[in-house]
Image (cartoon, rainbow, N blue to C red):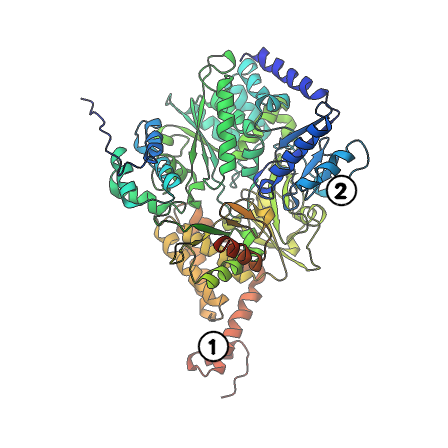
Amino acid sequence: MSALKTIPKAPSDDKRWRIVDSTMRRNGYEGHALIESLHSVQQAFGYLDEPGIRYVASALRVPISKAFGVATFYHYFTLKPQGKHACVVCLGTACYIKGSGEMLKRVSQKYAIKEGETTPDGELSLLSARCIGACGLAPAVVLDGEVLAKHTADDVVVKIERKLKP
Amino acid sequence: MTPEELQTLAARGQEKFAHYKHVLNVCMESGCVSSRSDTVADALDKEIAKRGAKEQICIKRVGCLCSCAQGPMVSQDDGKVLYKEVKAEDAGAILDAVGSKPVSRLQMPADHPFFTKQLRVVREHAGKFDPEDLEDSIRVGAYHGLMKVLTQMTPAEVIAEITTSGLRGRGGAGFPTGLKWSTVAKAGNPTKYIVCNGDEGDPGAFMDRSVMEGDPHRVLEGMAIAAYAVGAQKGVIYVRAEYPLAVKRLTRAINQATRQELLGANILGTKFGFTVEIRLGAGAFVCGEETALLASIEGRRGLPRPRPPFPANSGLYNCPTLINNVETFANIAPIINKGGAWFSKIGTAKSKGTKLFALTGKIVNTGLIEVPMGISLREIIFDMGGGIPDGRKFKAVQTGGPSGGCIPEKHLDIPVDYESLASVGSIMGSGGMIVMDDTSNMVDVARFFMDFCASESCGKCVPCRVGTYHMHEILRRINDGEGTSADLMLLRELCDTVKTTSLCGLGQTAPNPVLSTLRYFEQEYLDLISRAEATRAAAGDGHSKKAAGTTGLEVTL
């Protein structure tokens, strides 16, 4: 007897769940679409929260432990909401050799947040990347999606300041 | 599309561009786009429209023009004139110069060894056509190799051709591609998969990104040829989520090819069917390991498993699976078009063909290069790369990323091939080549890579999970001036244990950066340790007085 697949109700009536639903539907609600679906949640909401992971897990009929396992295993997924602005410092080898480690330290000290943290006012998140593949532009920093090439730590701080206090 | 239609389309493409007197190619890969090459291309378009020169000059948005640090790059008439660091406001000047004297303030020498010493097989057309335009891709030869195998060759002949070529896996390990293909072809299961490994997790490397962004149809064509050769029906490209432009171009290419029956149920009007889908990685270096990659495609954590069974027999969804790297697949079409014998003439006795390298770090000319195997590191770094900037001295070149090693000056004359690089304690790897000058602290470099490996260790096997953590801790201690002589012994012992007992390639190769820096730059470790011991002795720490004595430092009590 083929079990009828019952699709659970989305955690809220936020329209963004439709994007997630369409990803899962496109993959036939198969368990192997777990990573794709989590990508979809993160893209729509900016991060993965517990109701979101639970929803995807039950829709794909994957154990919740497995879904949390996947969400926490991969660096790309984040379980915390991000700040209004995001500063990603590339720590790929080429960038590191050219001083991106110092840059990360500088931004971290200036805003008193560690890598992976957000300022208490929710304005700025400081993140690092393993390599964004823009090694020719080393050291590279991505500020709100814009790649800042060959900047000094001072330049980066100035640009962040401009974002925070326009 | 039938084979005849493909040829007609190629001819039409030739015609379409034949009437232009000049072509201006603007690089549209991630590096240059980050420096806003899109605004340059738009400005050129506008300026041409304003001048009514649309029928004489063609603006194309193309793949990488190699000199990534000096973007946005613009090339006139297929590289005859090259411009660097072009801004949107330069559009007028560049157009004024077409057909007369080039704009000297923007020009870079197109006859520099950085360009002339390259040999382009994988990137033979890259930078000369628009990768988002199927017709333009076909004009430069896309899918002609696929047409040839479907109309003139049996699967066995295709494998024989690849075997003759001597092509080896470009992901780093260098497994013979022909042998891998024939193993999958022999596997009994009728359902088989082709997987393209585009999880370029190696920090400091962007060759695969460039191939996927600059010539996505060539990757698809290579996969389709492989599918025909081994009898597979489905393909998956596993791409890093960190490469959004590559994902976009590949998605577009798959849709275009499917619409034109270059992928799908009846490719080029034959009975052969093959479909490709994209799977996004999620930032795990270990997923470059094939069994971990398969686990990730199946939606699980990227944990490797012991082999055998090898993926060739039991891979994706337990079916026989052929896994090759992006660059390997991109080598297939030229081998089919020009023959395995032609390909095998390039390179050295055991390493055939060319290799893409991302030349970065403390070097004058940064960028993407494709060189024949066997070229020396010295030629790459000093002739092509232009040496070390700011009057500094060369110290080491790092190849192979976290799995590779640092090669010092005395070995710069070795030929670049799989065996020679391994003999000096590094590996070919996927193609990252990071140059370090005499300001680089090699202990910190080793610590940097061990930090990477410890954080990327999947945690499945103990030697890697625990070993990389402790190796990192020791390296941090030494680097921060807290090391002791005993640390060095323990470090060597741990390197040996982790190397020989880890489950997968990540752990087995994680000690390489440490071992190679210990081999060539041991003095830096010793200096840091003796300085630490002297400091401790001066502070009156009884324990380290004895240790300081062994380093020959006089301690006045």
- The quarter of the picture where residue B133 lies is top right
Q: Is residue B389 left or right of residue B326?
A: right
Amino acid at pointer 2: Pro
SS at mark 1? Answer: helix
Q: Quadrant of the N terminus of chain A?
A: top left
Question: Residue B212 at what x, y percent from top left?
Answer: 54, 34
Left or right: A96 in relation to B85: left
Say left or right for B140 vs B244: right
Label 1 is found on which chain of the structure? B
Give the structural element (helix, strand or loop) at label 2: loop
Above or below, comparing residue B146 to residue B318 in the picture: above
Q: Chain of mark 2?
A: B
Point 36% across, 49% down: residue: A81
Q: Are marks 1 and 2 on the same chain?
A: yes
Label 1 or label 2, whichever comes before in sequence order: 2
Tag 1 residue: B547
* Image quadrant in which you'd find residue B109: top right
- Image x and y of residue B542, in percent: 42, 82
- Which residue is drawn at the image coordinates 40% and 47% (left, top)? A75
The answer to whether residue B557 is above or below residue B262 is below
- Disc 1 residue type (three-letter): Ala
Disc 2 target residue: B109
| Outermost residue to the front | A166
Of B304 and A149, the residue lying toward us: A149
Relative depth, front residue between B361 and B346: B361
| Left or right relative to B201: residue B142 | right
Callout 1: 10 Å neighbours few (<14), some, many (20+)? some
Q: Is residue B347 visible?
A: no
Q: Residue reaching furthest bottom?
A: B557
Kindly identify the residue that appears in the image at 34 percent across and 53 percent down.
Answer: B462
